[in-house]
Image: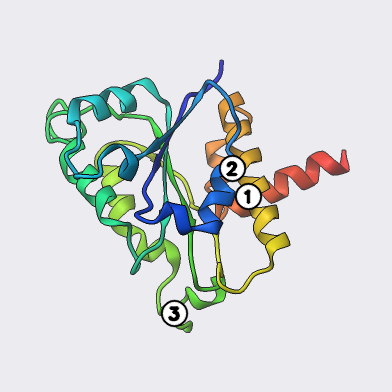
Amino acid sequence: MSNKILILFAHPRFESSANNSLLVKHIPDLPEITFHDLYERYPDFNIDIEYEKKLLSDHQIIVWHHPFYWYSAPPILKQWIDLVLEFGWAYGPGGDALDGKIIFHCLTVGGPQSAYNREGYNRFTLMELLSPFYQTAYLCKMVWLPPFTMHGTHRISTEEKIRTAQYYGTLLGMMVRGEFSVNEIKKFTYMNEWIISVTAKISAS
């Protein structure tokens, strides 16, 4: 049985983002994957709450795909969370609509991975900075997985960016086909680490 994936994409300047364009280009063209550009659909931020709820209900895996702006997400994603994840539907008494659904981030991050630790430039790990999203998922009874991340977007080579985008495409394809273990993925800090380890084992076999 295949999984349906909803990619909630939020980038206010997507047309000028080479990194996110590359990631999006490598999203598999599969009927099970819905690419949903929030800024394109809601340029006025007037979010259709019932439509968004229907999308969530129809998919098993949710991806928050966005640049990591000021240790958070672009404003439309916060607007989406505030409006769509309603009390009594997503959380609270009777709020079981998202129970058991899988959710994770796909992020582009300007700083290198080494900058995200207690001794690093940003003083916190990426997972610590994502804590409000983690708690949101927890409150909605969702299964939170570590982020897939393109770190150091201002510094890494084009070849490394392409390789990361290819891993993103491979990851999404495997998740559609159900070729993953939640418990195994949770052993890793980044989704990248899991997909790299899995593909290395496949290549070696």
Q: Quadrant of residue 100?
A: top left
- For marks 3 and 1, give the one nearer the viewer: 1
Tell me residue 39's x, y (percent).
31, 45
Tell me residue 78's x, y (percent).
24, 51
Observer-nearest residue: 201 or 43? Answer: 43
Q: Which residue is painted at 40% across and 62% down in the image?
A: 68
Q: Which residue is painted at 69% across and 63% down in the image?
A: 158
Q: Label 3 belongs to which residue?
A: 118
Which element is circle 3 on?
loop
Callout 1: 10 Å neighbours few (<14), some, many (20+)? many
| Quadrant, the N terminus | top right
Asked whether, in this view, residue 22 is left or right of residue 132, the answer is: right
Q: How many marks?
A: 3
Asked whether, in this view, residue 42 is left or right of residue 113, the answer is: left
Query: Quick one: label 3 or label 1, which is nearer the N terminus?
Result: 3
Residue at mark 2 to residue at mark 3: CA–CA distance: 34 Å
- Residue type marked 3: Arg
Q: Which mark is residue 126?
A: none
Q: Label 2 belongs to which residue?
A: 25
- Residue type marked 2: Lys
Q: Label 1 belongs to which residue?
A: 165
Outermost residue on the top side: it is 1
Please report contact status of discs 2 and 3: CB closer than 8 Å, yes or no. no
